[in-house]
Image (cartoon, rainbow, N blue to C red):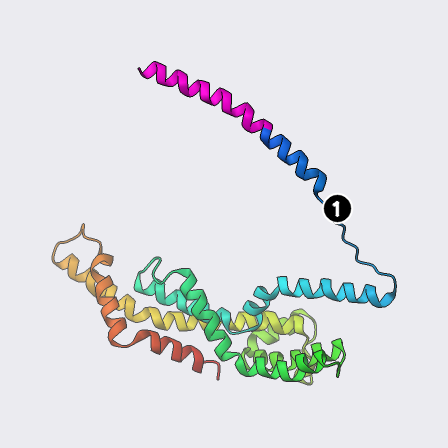
C-alpha cells in the first residue's frame, strides 16, 4: 500500500510540475507585453523645470536621511541609551521590547523638541511655503533654533576638540562655529551624559546583585544563579520607587 501511495504521489508531481511551469511562462509572457516602459528624466525643457526636479531629488534625499538627522541632532540619542541602561540594569533581555523603548524615546524626543519644532515651523517652513523667503533663507532660519539647542547641550571639551581638529580654535562668536564641528561635538556630549546617567542607574541594581550573591554564597547555594533571585527584588524596588517616572523626569529635566 505504501509503495502504491508513493507511486501516485510521484505521478501527480510529474504531471503537475510541467503544467505549472507552462502556466507561469504563459502568464509572464502575457504580462511582459503589457508592461509599460518607465524612464526617469532629471532634466526639463528649461532651467526652471530642471531646478524643480533637482529640488524634488534633494527633498527625497533629505526624507531618506531623516531618521539619522533625528538621531544626530535631537535628544533621541541620550534618551534611547538611558532607557537601554535601565533594561540592562533590571536584567531583562527583551522586556520592554525594542519597539516599545524606541517608541517611548521618539515621543519623549518630540516632547522635548516641541519648542524647537514650533520655532522651525513658524520661522522657516511657513514663510517658505507661502513664498515669503527663499530656500537658502529657510534653511538658515531652520538651523538657528536647532543650533541653539545643540550649543546649549554641548560640552566645552568636545567643542574645543572638534574646533582644534578643524583648525578653527579662534572663534569669536557662536555663529562662527561650523555645523561640521558642532554636530559631532553634540553627539559626543550626548553619549557622555547618557553614560553618566546610565552609571547612576546601574549602581542600586549592582548593590542588589552583590547582596544576593553574597547571601547565596554564605548559604552554600553556589549552583543557583544569583540573577534568578535578584530579578524579583530589582523589579519590586523599581516599582516601589516609581522608576519609570523618575527616569523620564530626569531625562526631560536634563535638557532644560
**Dominant secondary structure, magenta:** helix
Residues shaded magenta: 1-22
Q: Where residue 131 appears, x then y in whole percent?
A: 75, 81
Q: Where does the N terminus fall, quadrant-wise?
A: top left
Query: Is residue 191 in view?
Result: no
Q: Residues within 10 Å of mark 1 (few under 14, many from 20)?
A: few
Q: Where residue 120 appears, x then y in whole percent?
A: 62, 81
SS at mark 1 in the image: loop
Q: Quadrant of residue 141?
A: bottom right
212 and 250: which is toward the camera: 250
* Side of 101 relative to 150 (left or right): left
Q: Identify the residue at image location x=13%, y=59%.
A: 218
Q: Identify the residue at image location x=59%, y=32%.
A: 24
Q: Where residue 88 appears, x then y in whole percent?
A: 35, 62
Q: Is residue 214 magenta?
A: no
Q: Quadrant of residue 251?
A: bottom left
230 and 110: which is toward the camera: 110
Residue 42 vs 107, above or below: the answer is: above
* Side of 222 relative to 11 (left or right): left
Q: Is residue 6 magenta?
A: yes
Identify the residue position indicated by label 1 in the image.
37
125 and 174: which is toward the camera: 125
Amino acid at each position: 500500500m505504501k509503495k502504491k501511495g508513493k507511486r501516485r504521489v510521484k505521478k501527480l508531481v510529474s504531471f503537475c510540475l510541467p503544467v505549472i511551469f507552462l502556466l507561469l511562462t504563459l502568464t509572464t509572457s502575457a504580462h511582459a507585453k503589457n508592461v509599460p516602459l518607465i524612464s526617469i528624466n532629471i532634466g526639463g525643457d528649461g532651467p526652471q523645470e530642471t531646478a524643480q526636479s533637482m529640488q524634488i531629488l534633494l527633498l527625497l534625499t533629505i526624507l531618506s536621511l531623516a531618521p539619522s538627522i533625528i538621531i544626530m541632532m535631537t535628544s533621541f540619542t541620550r534618551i534611547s541609551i538611558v532607557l537601554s541602561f535601565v533594561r540592562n540594569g533590571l536584567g531583562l533581555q527583551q522586556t520592554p521590547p525594542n519597539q516599545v523603548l524606541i517608541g517611548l524615546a521618539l515621543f519623549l524626543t518630540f516632547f522635548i523638541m516641541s519648542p524647537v519644532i514650533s520655532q522651525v515651523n513658524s520661522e522657516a517652513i511657513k514663510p517658505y511655503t507661502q513664498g515669503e523667503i527663499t530656500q537658502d533663507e529657510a534653511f538658515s532660519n531652520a538651523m538657528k533654533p536647532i543650533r541653539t539647542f545643540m550649543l546649549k547641550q554641548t560640552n566645552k571639551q568636545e567643542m574645543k576638540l572638534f574646533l582644534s581638529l578643524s583648525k578653527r580654535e579662534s572663534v569669536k562668536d557662536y555663529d562662527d562655529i561650523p555645523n561640521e564641528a558642532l554636530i559631532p561635538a553634540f553627539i559626543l556630549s550626548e553619549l557622555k551624559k547618557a553614560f553618566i546617567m546610565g552609571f547612576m542607574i546601574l549602581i542600586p541594581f549592582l548593590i542588589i546583585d552583590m547582596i544576593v550573591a553574597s547571601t547565596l554564597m554564605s548559604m552554600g547555594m553556589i549552583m543557583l544563579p544569583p540573577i534568578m533571585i535578584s530579578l524579583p527584588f530589582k523589579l519590586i524596588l523599581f516599582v516601589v520607587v516609581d522608576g519609570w517616572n523618575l527616569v523620564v523626569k530626569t531625562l526631560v529635566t536634563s535638557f532644560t
